[in-house]
Amino acid sequence: MKMLDLSAACSTAIALVIGLDPQMLDIVRLSLLVSGSAVLLAALIGLPLGAMLALAEFPGRGVLVVTINACMGLPPVVVGLAVYLLLSRAGPMGRFGLLFTPSAMVVAQTVLVLPIVAALSRQVVADLWEEYGEQLRSLGAPRPVVMATLLWDGRFSLLTAVLAGFGRACAEVGAVMIVGGNISGVTRTMTTAIALETSKGDLPLALGLGIILIGLVTVVNAAVFLVGQAARRRMG
Amino acid sequence: MLKRLMILAALLLPSTVWAEERFITVASTTSTDQSGLFGHLLPLFQRDSGISVRVVAVGTGQAIKLGERGDADALLVHDRAGEDKFVAEGFGLDRRDVMYNDFVLIGPSGDPAVVKGLASVGEAFKRIAAAKAAFASRGDDSGTHRGELRMWKAAGVDVKAAGAGWYRELGSGMGPTLNTAAGMNAYVLADRGTWASFKNRQSLAIVVEGDKTLFNPYGSILVNPARHSGIKAADAQAWHHWLTGPKGQAAIAGFKIDGEQLFFPDAR
Amino acid sequence: MKPEIDSILPLELDGIGFGIEGRTLLGGIGLRLESGSRTIVLGPNGAGKSLLLRICHGLLRPTEGTLRWGGAGQPLAEQVIRRRQAMVFQRPVLLRRSALANIRYVLGLIGLARARHRAVAMEALDRFGLAELADRPARVLSGGEQQRLALARAWVVEPDVLFLDEPTSALDPAATLAVEMAIHEFHAAGAKIVMTTHDLGQARRLADEVVFLSRGRLVEVSPAARFFKAPASPQGRAFLAGELVC
């Protein structure tokens, strides 16, 4: 990449941000909405799942843990393809008409993010259990209470797990491209827009969008970091 | 965190269009979408019909696959053989000519195979093969790729036998292929529309154009509603008729980039 | 809160042993812990004191022998046994919430009506001098305050027996004194105390009875006065004399 392109990208990014281009705002909003919803869903399922895997003992648990850990590296394209086949009109869930909608993108990203949230929260809860185990057993806390307690007391570390999921969701293009279709104004996100501008050869615009995406993710992370930092300092 | 995300979702949800709007899904090619043609046509069609069109732009091969699975209501593609097969197998109905544009052979300014200005693309392909000059192929089963393979065959060059040397199958869309060709100073066959709107040309330029074999016709096909439930047959037909009717044809002729007309309507 | 029976004590240990991977860490322990008195478990490092406490409290399952609560009568329900004992650890594990919420957490576990949580919890905090700190996050309290909070948390359980595993070994003298006073409170309220300590002065101040362990074996059980004056076992004598007993 030449210096000229980089500076062109930066000035494009700045122009887009300053201009508050309505089309770009829609794209940003859709990206945040899709990835945010996916992370929310993945957290609702993944946090209890991770806690359960950390605490429960049942046959096949080891296999399940390894599988979920491995799924952290699921290729987005493969997930996109699987979800596409599921939601296609020729597929088992075709009649809901979800393909090429934001809902389809949320489904695909949830599948991508879930293993990350589950695997990392399993680790967090397992570590906490090391520390809390004797005390909670001494108090006679039943299993569901233990799970809830550890999830709550691990909330600052779990926030990082959720953020990792958010980062993955925001950054991926393979899955949303396939199940969303990159339809202008409907399913175009930051990443599919970047892919599109790249293929049009408009590299400064693509890179400019990339800079905005990185900026957005950084802002979200910084906000969560600051809130977490303050809370952590307060709660010890 | 959960609470924050929920608030975020709640804030964003109402403003996003998840309401039922009247739309059809058209699977088409990157060449039509990226040239900006759809950006020009769709608002006009929506004004006339009240139907919005959601375009999923992929390669022709993939677009036809989407049609076979019922994931689009209509197709606008450019591979006559594939289109006819699609209709013959009962997946599609009422294939109509819509327009054509043409392919252009793009090459690096150094022109190592010395093809610049040739009238025949067949001759140019022979020289490229003889010189073993780098050639970037889409390699993605798109309409352009299928057209390119037909041209190699007509030129009597067996690119399958070329190995991984000068003939490089990229498996990418038109834009990425042009990006790569620009990066490795390769020859590349492109549709004129994508080329016209492509910005990262570096040293690439048109070397051969105007040959009759570079003719690139597009067809519109309705997806057979009998094959899958949920196909929006009536609205798709409205689009199909508009596109091949006087209004659509005039709109196609009116689309220009830098004053140059890229697509030529040819519906009967 | 207190149901039918007066106490889950006595606790009888018969031939209790504990081993990991073929190594015996505790063996042949026969012991009867009566209600009311304060039993101090003494012994050199590695004698198995903490292990014995954990087995008694039910945190570890012995690999040998039997453990029986409630004497000769009807065996007690697991639930009853668990709810009527408490343990305070060397390093208190407090939840990441306020001191008050830490107490209320336990009240929720023992099923006290929500409406009474605040009053009961505040009474417990006040009893151990923590009323001012009720709304402070438990994790930012000083070591001594944290240990007192752990004691207040045990207090609301109204245990028949309180186990303490070296509760003052990480504390300064003032905090140690506060903990000892808290132990007096529990004892005065009728709770059995079973405690390990390294601090012989503390053992003298608190003990009614001494259980002396050495190398995983129960060596001597004596009334405190007798033990500190003239231990029956040579290991006990050596321990008091400050000699290394292995």
Image: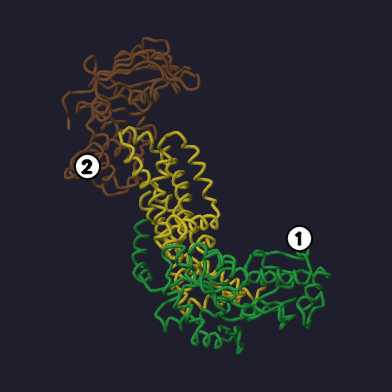
Chain colours: A yellow, B green, C brown
C183 lies left or right of A103: left
Task: Rate crowding at label 1 as few (under 14), some (14 to 19) or many (20 or more) other CA atoms within 10 Å.
Answer: few
- Which of the labelled discs sits on residue C124, or is there none? none
Task: Please give the chain letter of the residue carrying mark 1.
Answer: B
Along the line of sight, the residue nearer the viewer: A17 or C174: A17
Along the line of sight, the residue nearer the viewer: C118 or B143: B143
Residue C169 percent location from the top left of the image = 39, 32
Q: Is residue B124 visible from the viewing direction of this image? A: yes
Residue C28 percent location from the top left of the image = 40, 13
Residue A229 percent location from the top left of the image = 42, 56
Total tally of numbered discs in the picture? 2
Mark 1: amino acid: Ala
Along the line of sight, the residue nearer the viewer: B6 or B189: B189
Task: Rate crowding at label 2 as few (under 14), some (14 to 19) or many (20 or more) other CA atoms within 10 Å.
Answer: many
C110 lies left or right of C88: left
Q: What element carries label 1?
A: loop
Q: Name the residue under label 1.
A: B164
C-alpha separation, residue under disc 1 versus residue under disc 2 = 77 Å
* Picture quadrant where residue A196 is located: bottom right
Q: What element carries label 2?
A: helix
Q: Is residue A163 visible from the viewing direction of this image? A: no
Mark 2: amino acid: Ala
A232 relative to C171, above or below: below
Quadrant position of the N terminus of chain C in the picture: top left
Q: Name the residue under label 2.
A: C121
Task: Please give the chain letter of the residue carrying mark 2.
Answer: C
* Picture quadrant where residue B122 is located: bottom right
Same chain under badges 1 and 2? The reply is no
